[in-house]
Image (cartoon, rainbow, N blue to C red):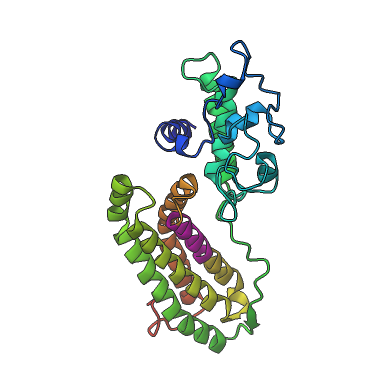
Amino acid sequence: MSGLMALVAVFLVIVGFNYLKISLPNLDLKNQQSNLSFEPDKDWDNDGLNNKEESFWGTDPNKPDTDGDSYLDGEEVVSGHDPLIKAPDDLLPTDDNLTQKMSALAMAGIYEGSLKPGGPNYEESLNKLASSIADNTIGVFNVDISKIELKLVNSDKYSQQTYIEDLSPIYEELLKTFSEQMFNLEDNLNDIGLYGLAYGDISKSFGESSSHYEKIFGDLSKKSVPKNWKDSHLGLIKFVGELSQASQSVASGQNDPIKASVGLNKIVQLWDIFPKITEKYSEKIKSAGLNPSKTIFK
């Protein structure tokens, strides 16, 4: 939990406020009484957002159409559009955007005071925010393999031998792609530290890796698989799918830096798992009495 709290704190200080739709109310003092309170539950401009919501989105509580695109601020929010960006390129991030979720939670805590450093409930609120982030990251790269229909064949020795020989070049491509990605990881992390996730080389590097993994995923899904290798093969497909999703999250990390961070951690975790998958394949080949000499598993 302490690690997550540190992530929350660093995010709020360095990254988070770039994503929080927060600003002081843009009060038109010339047209308002000097003693007028903020009145958070009022909707001064009748645009469908009360003043508290206007503060969250950074919109003008005295102007019903802040971005001037002929749509009321409230209408845009309800329909999934950003009230600060003119149509048509103004779609809000989707529900799987972890940074947007965290921003909303952090904004709520800042607004009601519990996330104010030094406040009486600050540590408790930070723990709750960290727990929420942890809950949202569980299974974020989960690959549904239940709908994959493998072409299953008999488990005779010939079919098994054919399977491991046909699998070998695909597995070799996976090893090559993954090894290159890990070899370049330190340089990529340094670039992220220097230039941020929007740096073009980062998007290119992780995007290319994700594309390679997608192809491998497709090749694995089309293979004929002996029935007694079904579970192992589906596990390998899931592994590659998670690699692809995690890599893509980093490639598009400027839109969701928290998900990109989770993706980087996931890639490292999968690298630790990869030798165990290879070992299990080698052990099963040996126990089945197959010949690994023409495969990568020899």
Picture quadrant where residue 18 is located: top left
The percent position of residue 204, horizontal first and vertical second, equals: 37, 63
Q: Which residue is drawn at 59% across and 41% down?
A: 135
**4 or 202, nearer to the observer:** 202
Q: Residue at x 29, y 61 (%)?
A: 183
Give the total of numbered labels: 0
Q: Is residue 17 visible in this depiction of the protein?
A: yes
The percent position of residue 71, horizontal first and vertical second, equals: 67, 46
Q: Is 29 located above or below residue 242 in the figure? A: above
Tell me if 30 is positioned left or right of 72 in this view: left
Picture quadrant where residue 61 is located: top right
Q: Residue at x 66, y 22 (%)?
A: 40
Which residue is outermost to the front? 30
Which residue is outermost to the top? 35
The percent position of residue 82, horizontal first and vertical second, equals: 59, 45
In the rendered structure, does residue 156 fall within the stretch colored magenta? no
In the rendered structure, does residue 246 fall within the stretch colored magenta? yes
Q: Is 87 located above or below residue 58 in the figure? A: below
Q: Is 251 located above or below residue 34 in the figure? A: below
* Most common SS among magenta residues: helix
- The magenta stretch spans which residues? 239-251
The percent position of residue 27, horizontal first and vertical second, equals: 57, 24
Q: Is residue 279 visible in this depiction of the protein?
A: no
**15 or 237, nearer to the observer:** 15
Q: Is 296 located above or below residue 7 in the figure? A: below
Tell me if 84 is positioned left or right of 178 in this view: right
The quadrant in which the C terminus is found is bottom left
Q: Residue at x 52, y 68 (%)?
A: 236
